[in-house]
Amino acid sequence: DQQVKQNSPSLSVQEGRISILNCDYTNSMFDYFLWYKKYPAEGPTFLISISSIKDKNEDGRFTVFLNKSAKHLSLHIVPSQPGDSAVYFCAASPNTGNQFYFGTGTSLTVIP
Amino acid sequence: EPEVTQTPSHQVTQMGQEVILRCVPISNHLYFYWYRQILGQKVEFLVSFYNNEISEKSEIFDDQFSVERPDGSNFTLKIRSTKLEDSAMYFCASSEARDRQFFGPGTRLTVL
């Protein structure tokens, strides 16, 4: 069951630069997407969401882009800060329910 | 800020024993969820609960598992006859509606 994929297990970025985390999905019924950040020994923390009626949502340093035709979404963090170092998960939900399918995560390291 | 709490933080049990994992969701939330994350793997949906009944469950959530909302605040996951492969982090989450879910810090279950 790989309905949501994050193909990059890790990413390193210099402080102040842009971090781009990618996520692909296969189920065309997905219509709501979220990004979570997770620190070790803690639960995932909600970052930002987007519904399929939009192609962009912005919240401070975080912007999520959705390309429905490509079944692809990305999270941009600008500027990246050392405190952003964590594992980032994308999650998607179909319009038929509220079960969320998670990707495998991308570990982001922001280098000071 | 309100948060989801989980107890215990770590549970060690012998194979074949029953365990109960406890969660206190955010008080005005109506939807409750359990997820698990086996070490090194993705977060997996187990079950969602709304209006005092299961609304969705995954293939993982078989007869070994059950959920209950025994009172107005607690939400529990019971695992009967635990197996070695049940060892994982178990996360509880809650949400007001079909949108962002707030996660608890997790319970680490170790089955010996």
Image (tube, rainbow, N blue to C red):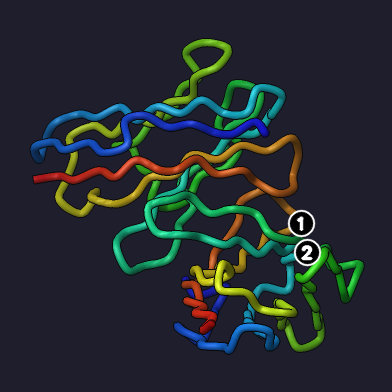
Q: Which mark is residue A63?
A: none
On the picture, is B58 further left or further right than B38?
right
Disc 1: which residue: A95
Q: Residue at x 51, y 86 (%)?
A: A11
Q: Nearer the viewer, residue B32 or B28?
A: B28
x, y percent for residue B10: 26, 38
x, y percent for residue A96: 73, 53
x, y percent for residue A18: 70, 86
**Which quadrant of the rendered structure holds the C terminus of chain A?**
bottom right
Whichever of labels 2 and 1 marks the residue nearer the N terminus, that label is: 2
**Chain under callout 1:** A
**Chain under callout 2:** A
Disc 2: which residue: A31
At label 1, which amino acid type do we have? Asn
On the picture, is B8 further left or further right than B12?
right
Q: Are marks 2 and 1 in contact (CB under 8 Å)?
A: yes
Q: Quadrant of residue A68?
A: bottom right
Q: Nearer the viewer, residue B4 or A97?
A: B4
